[in-house]
Structures are given as structure tokens and as C-alpha cells.
Amino acid sequence: MKNSILIVDDIHPIFIEQARALGFTCDYQPTLKADAAFGILPDYNGLVIRSKFQVDKQVLDLATNLRFICRAGAGMDNIDEDYALSKNITLINAPEGNMDAVGEHAIGLLLSLMNNLNAADAEIRKGSWQREANRGHELKGKTVGIVGYGHMGKSLAKKLSGFGVLIIAYDKYKTGFSDQYVREVSMEEIVRTSDVLSLHVPLTKETNGLVDDEYLFHFKKPIFLINTSRGKVVKTQSVLNAIKQGKILGAGLDVLETEKFPALREQPWFDELRQSGKVILSPHVAGWTFDSYRKISEVMAFKLKDVALL
């Protein structure tokens, strides 16, 4: 069927409304299992996914009439991008739709860590009033190092700009991006001068395991670490090791190497992570707000206009 889209994940209805206005037919099946999808993929020109659906070589070979894939979010690590592009399949994502959510969530994690909010709250609920033990750190005057200066990194920098911090950024794939929010620096300067490290890189072969024991060893000052990118960018045991060594003062982790239970509970580092008072965890929701739910779909539909013209 010409201009037909299979939607295999939950998305805001605004996408379907605007896609239909562009002349597309939408088959909304958010509970469809992967094996059931395999048999019908050849019937569609477009595919809309979020996280549960892995678009690998097998899927792309089955989808013989596929012209485009929309990823309702920013990361594209669940799509074999190179193989899709080799088959002339257009790839659409929507980092513009959840960049504000990620920036705000990162700041929330950071402020909670620096002011011991989670630990203090838990202590008071247990009947303990510990003022000195919960004395916090101020953001003003600190150096915030951002690794990865795309939509998410820039969103964080813009939101931090009112806190009186020095913001520096490193991006291996960009140059000349210094702006009113950040100064472009080398990774060496990030490591040498940062008080806060916030990660905003996609998961690739190069970034998989980027933050390990060796990487953290080279930081000159104790840091607060924030990861709202992908869990496999950071080795959790290395973070726990650095906390014990005093090299990490606190870690805010929205993502982990292994996510969801029961698999998470089976990880060798989970008990240590769970018991650490220096870590705040959230279940991969930094970019997933009531607002971004709609904005992501609006961005995808807007970008779909270019596909409709092909």
C-alpha cells in the first residue's frame, strides 16, 4: 500500500493526525510483537518505533518496500543505520522534541546530588536530623564539562547559563561550536578542570564503555557525574569504584548498562549500586515527559513532510 506507515509503539495521536494530512495511511499497532510484525513489514513504506523494536539487518531485509523509519526519540542505537542507509531508507529522529526534558532532568539530578536531597529526605523520614552531614555544594562558580554538544548538550548548557557556572564542552564530531553558553575545549581540558561531568553522546562502538576506570582515573578534581545518554556509555562498576575512591562525589544515572527487572537485579554491581547513598537513579525517563510525548510526535510529523515530497 502506497504511503502506508506501520506504528509499533505508543506515540502521541498528533503524529497520526498530521501524517494523514500529508496523505499517509497509518496502521497503529503499539502492542504488536516483533515476530508478528515480520510477516507484514513488506506491506508498509514507513515504520515508526520507540525502544522495544530492534531494526536490524533481518528486519530491514524483510521490509522490502520500506522508504523511511521514524524513531520517536533521539537515540538511533536500535537501528542498523549503515545498512538502512545502504538500502536508501530515510531515517528520522526527534531530538528537538525531548531536549528540554533531558536538560531539565539533568539539572534536577545534579541539584539533588549537590544538596543531598534524597539522602536527607530518607534520614528525616527515619527520625534522623543531620544538618552538618547534609551540607551541600553550590553550583555557582563550578566548571561543568559537557561531553557531546548536540541538541541535548546544548539544552543543558542553555539551562545552566543562569547558575553562574563556567560551561565547557567537547564533541569529537564537531568543531567551532563555541557559543553564548559554552566554550569548546579538548577532552583533556574536560578531564583537567571539570567539577561536573554530564554525558550527552549517542551509543556507538566508540562510546560504548567510554567512562571506565581508566577514564575516571585521569580527572584532577572530584566530580559529580550525570548520565542521561545511554547506559552502556558508562561502566557502572567503575562509577562505584570511583565513589569509593572519592573521585566521584555523586552520580545521577537515568540510564544503566542493564535496564528493567529482573535482569537488573542479576547484575553483579546492583546491590552495591542500590545501597549507595551517593547515587540517584531514575528509570530512563529523562526525555520522557508529558510534554515531550507530544513534542516528539510533532517533530517527527514535521520531518515527514520531506519524505512525502520524495
Image (cartoon, rainbow, N blue to C red):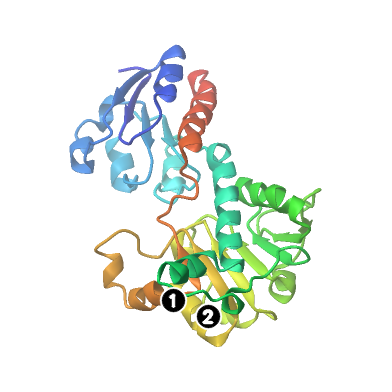
**Mark closest to the chain's N terminus, 2 or 1:** 2
Residue under circle 2? 243
Question: Does the image show residue 206?
Answer: no
Q: CA distance from mark 2 to mark 1?
A: 9 Å
Quarter the N terminus occupies: top left
Q: How many numbered marks have been drawn onto this rendered protein structure? A: 2
Q: What label sits on residue 36 in the rendered view?
A: none
Question: x, y (%) of residue 190?
Answer: 71, 69
Q: Residue at x 51, y 21 (%)?
A: 310
Which of the two residues, 158 or 45, is positioned nearer the viewer here?
A: 158
Which of the two residues, 103 or 147, is positioned nearer the viewer here?
A: 103
Question: x, y (%) of residue 108?
Answer: 57, 55
Question: x, y (%) of residue 168?
Answer: 74, 61
Q: Residue at x 38, y 19 (%)?
A: 3
Residue under circle 1? 276
Query: Is 7 above or below relative to 284?
Result: above
Question: Does the image show residue 119?
Answer: yes
Q: Label 2's element?
A: helix
Q: Label 1's element?
A: loop
Q: For the residue marked with disc 1, what is the amino acid?
A: Ser
